[in-house]
Each structure stands twice: as structure tokens, then as C-alpha cells.
């Protein structure tokens, strides 16, 4: 199935203050949250909440904290692309961090590419969950499968036999080794004022 072009929508823009609290969100934030069963992310309920309440996993937090520190110190933007999938869409987004009014940091998120796919219940937050967890990469959205490495979710479902289960495992979030290395290298290049700080984490591929 050919990739669907990004919808003609405004970028999602939000700001965090010096203490990493969410202080500004545009209307596109609310629209994206509503479209993706994120009622708990709608303002004004999250205004003033810590960014770290919504970033899962110590490794992911570590990388974002380093990015915030670097962008605040340098004043230069940092851009990267990452996956943000829904049950029936593979979605590649572009995220740019900038600090035009440091220490406040501006996040801008744009849709780069979308691929429709048959719905994957493992990614549906409404599906009943077991107590055991599977590790999912916060950046590329691949799933860790013992003995197989990190696989696209459709392949992981088959490798783990999850299509046969009525109650699915929960998903915990972290960073796969490849994305972790890629981001650390990009941050180092950014710190050295090199070009090329636009890594792609989880390019869209057909599973």
C-alpha cells in the first residue's frame, strides 16, 4: 500500500519552562490528543504538569534531559525524526527543539509520512492487559523479542504468538540499542557544531 501524504494540519507546538513544566500548547496539540484517545493529555488538565510525567523510561528521559540542556545552552535548534504509531497507522514525525526564549524550550512536531495498516491490538490502549510487559522503543516503536532482537510490531506479534492470546502484555518504554547509539552520536555532533543533527529513528518500512 503506498504511503499516504501527511494531512494538511498545523504542527503540534508546546513549550516547557525552566523547570520543564508544560506551560503552552497550541490547538493542534488538543486535536492530536483527541484523535489518538489521549483525553488525559488535554489542557487545561496538564498545564503546569512536569514533562517527565509523560516521558516513559529512564533512558528516554536521560536523552531528552541532555537535549534540553544542550538546546538551552547553545540556542541552536535540534531536529530529529521518530515514530509515533497508532494501532492502524505507522507515523513518522519530525520533532524540533529550540529555545528562542531560553530557558523556555519550544517543541514543534510535524507529520512527515503516514502508512495505513491493519489495526494492531497490541498498540490499542483500550485492550485488556496482562501483568507481564514487553519492551517497546520510545523512538522507533520496535518491540524487543527474545532471541530475535527488536522487530516491527507486526513481526513481533507473530514471533511471540500474541495473535493467539485474548489478553495482551503491557508495553514498557525505553530505547533500543540502535536508537540509543544514534541519538547519543547526534547529540555529540550537535555539541561539536557539526552538520547532520537530523537522525531518523524508525523509518517507515513495510512489515
Image: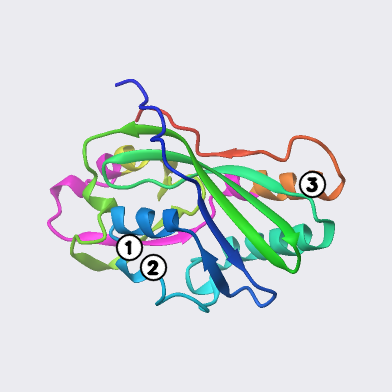
- Secondary structure beneath disc 3? helix
The percent coordinates of residue 201 (x first, y second) are 55, 41
163 magenta-colored = yes
**Contact (CB < 8 A) between labels 3 and 2?**
no
Residue visible at 34% across and 20% down in the picture: 2
The percent coordinates of residue 99 (x first, y second) are 73, 59
**Contact (CB < 8 A) between labels 1 and 3?**
no
**Contact (CB < 8 A) between labels 1 and 2?**
yes
Toward the viewer: 64 or 38?
38
Q: Please state the extent of the stretch shown in magenta in the rendering.
A: 157-180
Mark 1: few, some, or many residues within 10 Å (few <14, many ≥20)? Answer: few
38 left or right of 119? right
User: Could you tell me how many numbered marks the image carries?
Assistant: 3
The residue carrying mark 3 is 190
Report the Cα–Cα distance between label 1 and label 3. Answer: 33 Å
Give the foreground label among 1 and 3: 1
Toward the viewer: 180 or 107?
107
Instruction: Determine whether 90 is above or below 3 in the image.
Output: below
The percent coordinates of residue 27 (x first, y second) are 43, 57
Instruction: Determine whether 176 is above or below 38 in the image.
Output: above
Mark 3: few, some, or many residues within 10 Å (few <14, many ≥20)? Answer: many
- Secondary structure beneath disc 2? helix
Residue visible at 57% across and 61% down in the picture: 60
Report the Cα–Cα distance between label 1 and label 2. Answer: 5 Å
The residue carrying mark 2 is 41
193 magenta-colored = no
Give the foreground label among 3 and 2: 2
Mark 3 vs 2, N-terminal side: 2
State the residue lying farthest toward the top: 2
The residue carrying mark 1 is 38
Amino acid at each position: 500500500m503506498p504511503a499516504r501524504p501527511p494531512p494538511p494540519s498545523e504542527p503540534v507546538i508546546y513549550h516547557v519552562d525552566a523547570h520543564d513544566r508544560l506551560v503552552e500548547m497550541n490547538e493542534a496539540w488538543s486535536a492530536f490528543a483527541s484523535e489518538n484517545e489521549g483525553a488525559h493529555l488535554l489542557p487545561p488538565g496538564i498545564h503546569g504538569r512536569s514533562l517527565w510525567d509523560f516521558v516513559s523510561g529512564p533512558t528516554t528521559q536521560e536523552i531528552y534531559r541532555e537535549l534540553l540542556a544542550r538546546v538551552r545552552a547553545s540556542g541552536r535548534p535540534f531536529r530529529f525524526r521518530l515514530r509515533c504509531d497508532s494501532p492502524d497507522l505507522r507515523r513518522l514525525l519530525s520533532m524540533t527543539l529550540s529555545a528562542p526564549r531560553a530557558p523556555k524550550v519550544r517543541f514543534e512536531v510535524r507529520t512527515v509520512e503516514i502508512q495505513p495498516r491493519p489495526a494492531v491490538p497490541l498498540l490499542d490502549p483500550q485492550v485488556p492487559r496482562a501483568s507481564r510487559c514487553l519492551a517497546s522503543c520510545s523512538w522507533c516503536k520496535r518491540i524487543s523479542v527474545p532471541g530475535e532482537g527488536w522487530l516491527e510490531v507486526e513481526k513481533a506479534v507473530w514471533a511471540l504468538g500474541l495473535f493467539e492470546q485474548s489478553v495482551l502484555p503491557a508495553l514498557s518504554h525505553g530505547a533500543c540499542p540502535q536508537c540509543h547509539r544514534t541519538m547519543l552520536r547526534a547529540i555529540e555532533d550537535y555539541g561539536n557544531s557539526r552538520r547532520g543533527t537530523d537522525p531518523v529513528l524508525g523509518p517507515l518500512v513495510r512489515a
